Amino acid sequence: PRELRSTATGPLEEANRTLEQRVEDGIDRLRSTERLAAYGQMVAGVAHEVRQPIFALSTAIYVLGDKLKDRTDVAPQLNLLSRETKRMTAIMDELLDFAKPASLFTTRTGLPDLYREAVELYHSEPGSGGVEVAVTCADGLPAVLLDRTRVLQVLVNLMRNARKHAQGITKIALR
């Protein structure tokens, strides 16, 4: 009985440790994602708040430039102020663009072609050998509207994760 208990619990304990590690890794990834999202929101908030003072400076520079248009002694400084406020505006616009989710570029795509390309991309990576990818796709499916690049990225990432986290994997089914 003692030998039987010892033999049976060994693989279970190992599976439990592996599962605990995978859960811990998942929680760490989630925390990292949440931090990045919070960072993006903070950057957008700061950029939005900084735009107002830049606009006020631009307006003041315009008014001063109009009132002092005959003063050639201050023209270089006004030009510098104008140029630098435009540069700050461009930087704030870039920060706001960074915080926005990227646009989708959708196109009609046939799933068999999409799956074939995903498998080719996956197999072009080091370490993907030895894992067969079986693709099943029903005949006659209509093309679907999707962002091909992003869906390819998702499919390849799913296959990578399967290879990385499923010990002893020999086959991935893509359907």
Image (cartoon, rainbow, N blue to C red):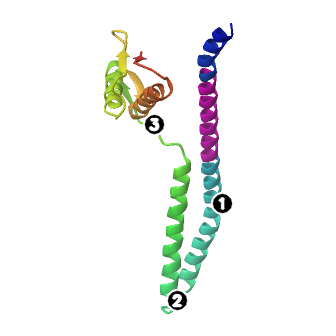
Q: Is 64 in front, or is 149?
A: 149
Q: Is 3 in front, or is 24?
A: 3
Disc 1 to disc 2, how far (Cα)? 29 Å
The first of marks 2 and 3 along the sequence is: 2
Q: Is 118 in front, or is 15?
A: 15
Q: Quadrant of the C terminus?
A: top left
Q: Are marks 1 and 3 in contact (CB under 8 Å)?
A: no
Q: Are marks 1 and 2 in contact (CB under 8 Å)?
A: no
Dot 1 lies on which element? helix
Q: Is residue 81 highlighted in magenta? A: no
Magenta residues, as a range?
Answer: 15-37
The amino acid sitting under disc 2 is Val
Camera-near label (2 vs 3) is: 3
111 vs 39, left or right, is left
- Density class for disc 3 (Cα within 10 Å; few <14, some 14-19, many ≥20) is few
Residue 49's label in the rendered image is 1
Disc 2 to disc 3, how far (Cα)? 48 Å
> Where residue 129 appears, x then y in whole percent?
33, 27
Determine the residue positioned at 46% across, 27% down. 158
Camera-near label (1 vs 2) is: 1
Dot 2 lies on which element? loop
Disc 1 to disc 3, how far (Cα)? 28 Å
Q: Which residue is mark 2?
A: 74
Q: Quadrant of the N terminus?
A: top right
Q: Which residue is mark 3?
A: 104
Quadrant in which residue 57 is drawn: bottom right
50 vs 172, left or right, is right
Determine the residue positioned at 49% across, 68% down. 87
